[in-house]
Image (tube, rainbow, N blue to C red):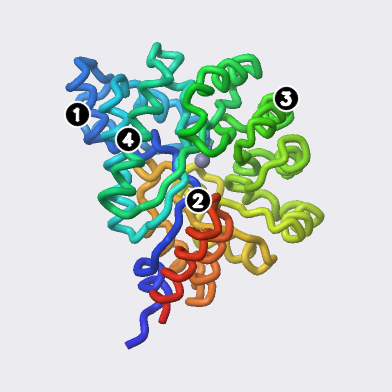
Amino acid sequence: MSMTAAQLAAAIPKTELHIHIEGSLEPELIFALAQRNGLSLPYDSVDALRAAYAFTDLQSFLDIYYAGASVLLREADFHDMAWAYFLRARADNVVHCEIFFDPQTHTARGVPMATVINGLSSACDRAQAELGISTALILCFLRHLSEEDAFATLEAAMPYRARFIGVGLDSSEVGHPPSKFSRVFARCRELDLRIVAHAGEEGPPAYIWEALNDLKTERIDHGVRSLEDPALVAELAKRRTPLTVCPLSNLKLCVVDDLKHHPMKRLLDAGLCATVNSDDPAYFGGYMNANFVQTVEALGLSREDVVTLARNSIEASFVNEARRGELMALLDSAID
Ligand code: ADE
Ligand code: ZN
């Protein structure tokens, strides 16, 4: 009995490289944390909150995403949010995750950096110990805020330097090009932080060039608009720069009008190191397997495509070579 490509996608061990932990906060948990912290929400019920998840673009999502994150106050809140994500990841056969967090969303509300990082990092330790999932944290700067604010955030995170492996750049893309943060990322490179950035989600290919050349990113988050610039596609292929693509996010934020028109197949056919990820799964209708299976079905991807996507993700991850070998071996034995 051979599996379909979609069944194979669901069954194989996978790596997730683009998940905003605040985007894993399910409406039920938002309400539970609000109650635990004595906060009131501008929605009467879980259903009323979920009904507000009808996005027209990135900003319409971000407004609700930042409001949802405002229920996070204590270390246990950050831990519980991340632990709930790891249980979902386990259920989808995810064996390694690199997790974005947005400290400025919390420090701006008076939550100490220590609270954010200690809560997330204890959940990461627990995921390794209890679920066998390897993890890493990536601190993201909010690009709608200033360079000065990003520098202050980096400074505040320095006592916890050992708890995160890299930095990223997220939030409202258009009007906030990567070059706005060239000096911050230069400093991050001096600190031996791994470098990624969101680019080419809503923004133009020029932003992807800037992420590569000014920030010196090792991966591009999203990057779906790269296909508009053949010279850029050639450069990404030559450098083998991974793209962390998030199909259900692209659908829900109206980057594509139908999953059948999603560029994933074209990215693969162009020889790019494209990967599948969930971005903000509580808001976009699904975790890793939902993204993988729906993309495979909408685009008619083959089992070979599925294996390529899974391998790309292992290749693109920031694990050490020993763990990379383990992840490849796990995948190989699942395919046999
Ligand atoms: N923050 C959370 N999700 C994001 C996305 N898809 N793009 C930019 N910033 C984000
Ligand atoms: Zn993202």
Q: Residue furthest bottom?
A: 1
- CB atoms at circles 4 and 1 under 8 Å apart? no
Q: Which of the labelled discs sits on residue 183, or is there none?
A: 3
Question: Between disc 3 and disc 1, whose residue precedes?
Answer: 1
Name the residue that disc number 2 marks: 246
Question: Between disc 4 and disc 2, whose residue precedes?
Answer: 4
Name the residue that disc number 1 marks: 32
In the image, taking residue 220 as reference, residue 19 lies left or right, namely left
Label 2 CB sits under 8 Å from any ligand 2 atom:
yes
The image position of residue 69, as x and y in percent, is 36, 26
Dot 3: few (<14), some (14–19), or many (≥20) neighbours within 10 Å? some
SS of the residue under disc 3: helix
The N terminus appears in which quarter of the rendering?
bottom left
The C terminus appears in which quarter of the rendering?
bottom left
Question: Between disc 4 and disc 1, whose residue precedes?
Answer: 1
Dot 4: few (<14), some (14–19), or many (≥20) neighbours within 10 Å? some
- CB atoms at circles 3 and 4 under 8 Å apart? no
| Type of amino acid at the residue the image marks with label 3 | Arg
Name the residue that disc number 4 marks: 122
SS of the residue under disc 1: helix
| Type of amino acid at the residue the image marks with label 4 | Ser
Let me know if residue 175 appears in the view. no
